Image (tube, rainbow, N blue to C red):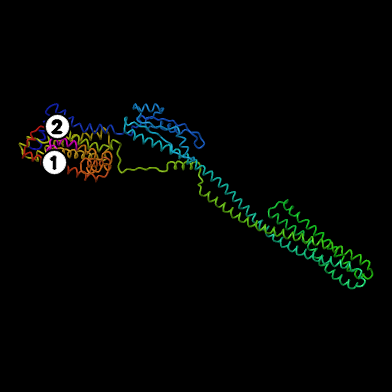
C-alpha cells in the first residue's frame, strides 16, 4: 500500500458515517471559529470606546482666575460631554457610586470642589496641584482601570494646556506692557540726558564766571585794604596838622613841602577809590549773569545782589568822601603857599582836614571790610559752582547709563502683536509635538493580534484533528513494514486537513474581517507551512507517547501561548519563559506572519522558516523512529486502549 492509498483510506474512515463527517467538519472549523470570532470581537475596541459608560461628577465651586470668576470643572465637563471619547454621564456623586456598584458605569471621574481654586493657586504664593479623582470597580471590568487612567491623563493634559495657555498669554501681555513702559522710560531718560548736558554747559560757565568773580573780588579786597591803610595815615597826618597849626607860622615852608607829599598820597588814594567804585557795577553785572546761567531765578539773584548792594553803597560813599578829601587836600596844597598870610585860616582848614581824614579812614575801613566779605563769598560761590559742575557731570553720566540700560532692556523684550502673543502662549502650553512614524503599521487592533491568533488557531486546529485522526495505521505497520511511508501518510493526512483549516482561516481574515496583507500569498504559505509543522510535532508526540503525547500537545500549546510574544513583547517574560521563546516554533510563526502581513523585513522570514523546517523535519524523523520501533517491537502498551479514546 502506497502513501496516497493510506491517506485515502484514512479519509474514507473519517467520512464513513454522517456523524463522522459532521465531526470532521466541526474540527476543521475549530481554528476558523477560534481565530475568526476572537479577532472579529477585538477588531477595533479602541474605536468603540464611545460606547463605554463613564460617570462624570463635577463638585467644583469655581474661583477667581486672573481676575475673572470661572468654573474650570464645568468648562472641562462641557468639553468631555461634547467629545466622543466615552459615553459620558454627568451625575451626582451618590448616583455615580450607585451606578458603579450596579455596573452601569465602568469608572467614575470626579472634579472636586477646589478644582478651580487649586488651578488658580498656581499664580499665587502657595501653589498646589489640582486633583482629578478616578474610581474603578474591577468587578465590572479590570481593563476599565487602565482605560480610566488614560482618560484622566487626557483630562489632566487638556486642563493643563488650557491653564498654561491662558497664563502664558497673561505673562506675554504683561511683558508687552512692561516693554511699552520701558520705551517711555527710555524716552524720558533721553530727555533727562539732554537736559543734563545743557545744565552741564551752564554749570561750567557758572564755575568759570564765579572763578573770575573770586579773582576780581580778591583784587578789590586788596585795593580797599590799601585804601584803608592810606586813609588811616591821612587821618593821623591831618591830626598832626591840626595839632601843629599853631606852629604853621614858624614852619610854613616845611608845611608846604609836607602838603605836597600829602597831596600826592591823596591823589593815589583817590585814584584807587575811583577804580574800586568804577569796577563795582561791572562786578555786580558779572555776578548776576553767572547766577542766571547757573539756573537761579531772578528773585534768588536779586536776593543775593541785595546783600552786595550795601557794600557797593558804602564803597561809593567812601569814594565820594575820598574824592572830596582829595579835593580838599588839593585846596590845602594851593593854600599852603598862603599859610603865611592866613595862619588863622590854616588852623581852621587843618581842623576840617582832620575831620575829613577821620571820616575817610572810617569809610575806607568799611569798604575794606565789605570787600573782604565779597572776596570770601565769591570764593564760596566759586567752590560751590565747581562742585555743582562736577555733580551735574556725574548725574549726566548716570543718566546716560540709565538710558542705555533701558534701551538694552527694550531690545531684549520682543515687540509682538496680539496674534503673535496668542500663538506664543499656545506654543508654551503645548511646547512638544510628538511626531510618530512607523516602519510598518498594523491596520487596527485586531490586525495587530492576527499573526498571534492565526498561529495559535493553527495549533488548536491540528490538536483537534488528532482527536479523530489516527497518528499511524496499525494495519499498515503490520502489513507493510515500511516506517517512512507509514509516517508520511500519518503526517500528510492531518497536514492536508490543516491546510484546509488555514485556507478557511485566511479567507475569513482577508475577506470577512477585511484585514490587509502586504504579501497575502506569502502569509497563506506561512500558515500552511506552520500547520504542517504543528502536524509533525503532534504526530511525533502521539507516536511515541500515545494519549500522554496528546496531552503534552495541549501543554505545549499552553507554553507557546505565553512565550510566543503575541501580545506583550517577549522581553517582558520571566527568564525561563523568555528562553523558551527562542526554542518553540510558534514565536517564529508569529514573527514571519508580522513581516509579510505588515510589510516588514521579508529577510527575517527565511530564518523563521528554517526554524519551522527544522521542527517539521525533526518531528517527522522522530515519528519515523517511533514507527520503526513499532514495526520491530510490539508491547502490551500498544494493545492497551487510549486514555483519551
Left/right of residue 223 with respect to residue 403 in the rendered view: right
- Range drawn in magenta: 541-555
Which percent across, then down, holds residue 247?
A: 91, 70
Residue 165, label in figure:
none
Quadrant holding the N terminus: top left
Coordinates of residue 489 in the picture (x, y in percent): 11, 37
Q: Give residue 644's mark.
A: 2
Q: Position of residue 371 (x, y in %)?
A: 76, 60
**Left-right relation of 452 to 20:** right
Q: Which residue is mark 1?
A: 620
- Looking at the figure, which quarter contains the C terminus? top left
Instruction: Tell me the residue at 21%/45% (across/down).
Output: 607
User: Is residue 171 in view from this perspective?
Assistant: yes
Image x and y of residue 362, in percent? 82, 61
What kind of element bears circle 1?
helix
Identify the residue shown where x is 91% and y is 66%.
347
Tell me if 78 is positioned left or right of 140 in this view. Answer: right
> Secondary structure beneath disc 2?
loop
**Residue at (82%, 68%) from the top-left corner?**
265
Sequence-wise, the earlier of marks 2 and 1 is: 1
Amino acid at each position: 500500500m502506497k502513501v496516497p492509498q493510506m491517506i485515502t483510506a484514512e479519509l474514507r474512515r473519517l467520512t464513513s458515517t454522517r456523524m463522522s463527517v459532521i465531526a470532521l467538519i466541526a474540527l476543521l472549523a475549530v481554528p476558523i471559529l477560534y481565530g475568526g470570532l476572537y479577532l472579529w470581537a477585538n477588531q477595533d475596541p479602541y474605536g468603540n470606546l464611545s460606547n463605554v459608560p463613564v460617570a462624570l461628577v463635577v463638585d467644583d465651586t469655581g474661583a477667581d482666575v486672573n481676575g475673572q470668576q470661572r468654573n474650570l470643572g464645568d468648562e472641562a465637563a462641557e468639553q468631555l460631554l461634547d467629545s466622543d471619547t466615552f459615553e459620558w454621564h454627568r451625575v451626582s456623586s451618590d448616583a455615580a457610586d450607585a451606578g458603579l456598584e450596579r455596573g452601569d458605569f465602568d469608572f467614575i471621574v470626579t472634579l472636586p470642589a477646589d478644582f478651580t481654586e487649586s488651578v488658580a493657586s498656581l499664580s499665587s504664593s502657595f501653589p498646589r496641584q489640582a486633583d482629578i479623582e478616578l474610581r474603578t470597580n474591577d468587578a465590572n471590568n479590570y481593563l476599565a482601570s487602565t482605560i480610566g487612567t488614560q482618560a484622566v491623563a487626557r483630562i489632566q493634559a487638556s486642563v493643563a494646556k488650557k491653564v498654561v495657555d491662558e497664563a502664558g498669554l497673561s505673562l506675554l501681555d504683561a511683558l508687552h506692557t512692561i516693554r511699552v513702559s520701558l520705551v517711555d522710560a527710555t524716552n524720558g531718560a533721553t530727555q533727562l540726558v539732554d537736559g543734563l548736558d545743557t545744565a552741564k554747559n551752564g554749570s561750567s560757565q557758572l564755575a568759570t564766571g564765579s572763578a573770575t568773580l573770586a579773582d576780581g573780588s580778591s583784587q578789590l579786597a586788596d585795593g580797599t585794604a590799601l585804601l584803608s591803610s592810606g586813609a588811616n595815615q591821612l587821618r593821623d597826618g591831618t591830626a598832626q596838622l591840626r595839632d601843629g597849626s599853631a606852629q604853621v607860622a614858624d614852619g610854613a615852608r616845611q608845611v608846604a613841602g609836607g602838603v605836597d607829599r600829602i597831596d600826592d598820597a591823596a591823589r593815589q588814594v583817590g585814584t584807587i577809590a575811583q577804580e574800586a567804585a568804577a569796577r563795582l557795577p561791572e562786578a555786580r553785572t558779572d555776578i548776576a549773569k553767572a547766577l542766571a546761567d547757573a539756573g537761579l531765578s531772578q528773585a534768588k539773584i536779586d536776593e543775593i545782589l541785595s546783600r552786595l548792594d550795601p557794600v557797593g553803597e558804602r564803597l561809593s560813599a567812601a569814594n565820594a568822601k575820598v574824592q572830596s578829601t582829595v579835593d580838599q587836600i588839593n585846596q590845602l596844597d594851593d593854600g599852603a603857599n598862603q599859610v603865611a598870610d592866613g595862619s588863622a585860616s590854616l588852623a581852621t582848614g587843618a581842623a576840617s582836614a582832620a575831620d575829613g581824614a577821620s571820616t575817610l579812614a572810617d569809610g575806607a575801613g568799611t569798604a575794606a571790610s565789605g570787600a573782604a566779605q565779597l572776596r570770601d563769598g565769591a570764593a564760596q560761590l566759586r567752590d560751590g559752582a565747581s562742585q555743582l559742575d562736577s555733580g551735574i557731570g556725574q548725574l549726566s553720566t548716570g543718566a546716560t547709563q540709565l538710558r542705555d540700560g533701558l534701551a538694552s532692556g527694550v531690545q531684549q523684550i520682543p515687540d509682538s502683536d496680539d496674534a503673535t502673543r496668542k500663538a506664543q502662549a499656545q506654543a508654551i502650553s503645548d511646547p512638544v509635538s510628538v511626531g510618530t512614524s512607523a516602519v510598518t503599521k498594523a491596520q487596527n487592533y485586531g490586525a495587530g493580534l492576527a499573526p498571534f491568533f492565526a498561529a495559535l488557531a493553527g495549533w488548536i486546529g491540528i490538536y483537534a484533528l488528532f482527536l479523530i485522526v489516527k497518528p499511524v495505521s496499525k494495519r499498515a505497520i503490520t502489513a507493510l513494514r515500511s516506517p517512512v511511508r507509514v509516517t508520511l501518510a500519518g503526517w500528510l493526512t492531518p497536514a492536508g486537513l490543516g491546510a484546509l483549516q488555514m485556507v478557511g482561516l485566511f479567507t475569513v481574515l482577508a475577506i470577512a474581517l477585511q484585514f490587509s496583507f502586504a504579501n497575502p500569498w506569502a502569509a497563506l504559505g506561512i500558515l500552511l507551512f506552520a500547520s504542517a509543522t504543528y502536524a509533525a510535532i503532534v504526530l511525533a508526540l502521539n507516536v511515541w507517547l500515545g494519549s500522554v503525547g496528546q496531552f503534552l500537545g495541549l501543554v505545549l500549546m499552553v507554553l507557546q501561548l505565553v512565550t510566543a510574544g503575541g501580545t506583550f513583547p517577549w522581553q517582558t517574560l520571566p527568564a525561563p519563559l523568555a528562553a523558551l521563546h527562542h526554542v518553540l516554533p510558534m514565536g517564529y510563526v508569529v514573527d514571519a506572519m508580522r513581516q509579510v502581513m505588515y510589510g516588514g523585513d521579508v529577510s527575517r522570514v527565511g530564518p523563521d522558516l528554517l526554524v519551522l523546517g527544522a521542527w517539521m523535519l525533526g518531528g517527522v524523523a522522530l515519528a519515523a523512529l517511533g514507527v520503526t520501533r513499532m514495526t520491530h517491537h510490539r508491547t502490551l502498551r500498544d494493545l492497551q486502549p487510549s486514555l483519551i479514546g
